[in-house]
Image (cartoon, helix red, strand yellow):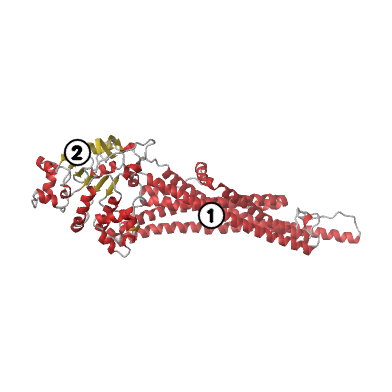
Amino acid sequence: MAANIHEEEVLGKAYDSRLMKRLLGYLRPYKWQVALALVAIVLKSAADVVGPYITKIAIDKYLAPARGTSSVLDRWLSSVPLTGIAQIGGLYVGLLLFGFLLEFLQTYLMQWTGQKIMFDLRSQIFRHLQRMHVGFFDKNPVGRLVTRVTTDVDALNEMFTAGVVSIFEDVFVLVGILAIMLNMDWRLALITFAVLPLIMIATMVFRKFVRDSYRRIRIAIARINAYLQEHVSGMLVLQLFNREKRAYDRFAEINASHMEAFKDAILAYAFYYPVVEILSSMAIAAVIWFGGGQVIRGVMTHSLALEFSHAKLVSFHVVTSAVTLGVLVAFMQYAQRFFRPIQDLSEKYNILQSAMASSERIFKLLDTTVEIESPAVVTQVTGPGRIEFDHVWFYYRTVPEKNADGLPNPNAGEPDWILKDVSFAVEPGETAAIVGHTGAGKTTMISLLLRFYDVQQGAIRIDGVDVREMDLMELRRRFGVVLQDPFLFTGTVEQNIRLGSEHVTDKQVERAAEDVNLGDFIRSLPGGFKEPVHERGSTLSTGQKQLISFARALAHSPKILVLDEATSSVDTETELRVREALSRLVEGRTSLIIAHRLSTIQRADKIIVMHKGRLREMGTHQQLLAQRGVYWKLYQLQYKDQEFPAGAASAQLGGPAVQVSADD
């Protein structure tokens, strides 16, 4: 889990051109919707900026007329004050409605686009996960992969639907307000902008604290996901050993760290927004003081000039104020609107930074090389199902630098071989069994046969064709596999037998259930074959789930059957029920059976004995007993308390579990 947490910890840059370019590629299929949304954003920004300017026109032209002022709307406005005010009011309402429609349009289009991108991304991630080999899932916790598909994709959706859109809108509004304010009165504009350095300082401090809080929040979320996934999956063991309180206390610690991080973020917001409000109010107050003084002085000068004119004392030129009442009111409105986008940009910075970190993690997953995939040119296989292992060597990992005692390993860095020079062949229609102690490499051989891993040396062939030259789907379609721990999906009994294969008919499903002696049980269920199966088949017994696995394998009519400890976890009664099913399953098929219970494989045509990764013995049951080697020792350990005649042993399916030391 430490690696998972470390990966979540890194936030990275707020903007990475390489990542952004790749992200924008997901917008390409929806370019027309995005283009229309951008047009709506530009028009909406213009509508927002024009509002206070219309107020200025109404005041300077009708409410407090100022000589020498003009506007672009003069030619369309009436000279009659009441009519003109009505026209301006209608225009203002029209702008509001227009802005509402544009807001609706861009919101709908960007939310729609965001959902489409989320769908595409999640589909791509899931498709990529399906192509990854089994070893990838051994190294990557489920909680981390789930976070990629859920939390990280949500962060990108927020960026596309809220972050980028708001940034564009805020920038357009800021540029528009800036241009209009400088055009109306550059002195008042500079007074308004005087508080910007203080706001920038407050923003940088705020961003630093929020960045740290968001980093801790992401770490806490990653820990919560990992902890929940592990402990919900292991709830049975948790309850069995009375670990509920300790697990709850640990979860409470992780949950508290998430809450504390969020509280710090809330505290930062609680300080930042009032600070910006105070500074913006100071700017507005300065505008009122300076601009108001200009308006008053202009009005007084104008009144004095009128008095002198009436008295005919002097000849004069009418003095008009540079700052009119309309300009002052418009500046107050613009000042309020100017600082709001600055606040939004600070918040969007965090959204952008979180999205960049999420995209980096998502692309790191998507860029993970698919180690096992179909070759560019596949070789078609036609044959009854001959299996051949040709001098196969395989290892999962290299020898570590230090052993369990902390001492240096003399072979550090060298391959830790699981299989060593394994060679054998299973002829078509033949039943071969693989036996050996735990860790001898039995299940690894099955994984290599199904190409979950690739061999490092040697080759595995099906009907003379190397499995690495075959199409993966075609290769695995030839196999029917029954595992020791049966896995059922949420759905129905029929769906778990068919497993989405359209070529498997309802009659084949029912016939397979009958052949494995499962028909009576299914008919006893309220829904029959349509009976719901909950997650992992929690409502069914282990034996019932195993029988469904046998029916699944039989329904798909495979050429090669693989049974990996398929009866080791069922009771004797259930095992007796599947005995006939086993004989029907292997009939006419190449079969490979892994078993600890030697009684289950005594009828095999060939028994392969593995020991410490090597093929030590091979032959029939009687031949191997006569050799008095590893197989004979295994047999003696299982039946040391009782002797069975050969015929009775062949018919017997039960038997104690095998335990063999590594030195046998």
Q: For residue 637, say whether it is visible.
A: yes
In this rendering, the answer to whether 244 lies above or below 222 is: below
* Residue 659 % position (x, y): 16, 49
Q: Is residue 229 left or right of residue 154?
A: left
Return the x and y of residue 536 as percentages of the image width and height. Answer: 32, 57
CA–CA distance between discs 1 and 2?
Answer: 61 Å
Residue drawn 22% across and 38% down?
425
Give the left or right position of residue 86, taking residue 493 as reference.
Answer: right
Residue sitting at x 33%, y 63%: 527
Q: Which residue is disc 2 drawn over?
A: 615
Instruction: Decide which of 499, 571 is in the foreground and name it.
Output: 499
Question: In what element is the residue under mark 1?
Answer: helix
**Residue named by callout 1:** 111
Q: Quadrant of residue 403?
A: top left
- The x and y percentages for residue 487 are 30, 53
Please give left or right for residue 144 compared with residue 342 in the image: left
The picture places residue 596, in percent across and down from the top left corner, at: 18, 48
Per the image, label 2 sits on a secondary structure element best described as strand
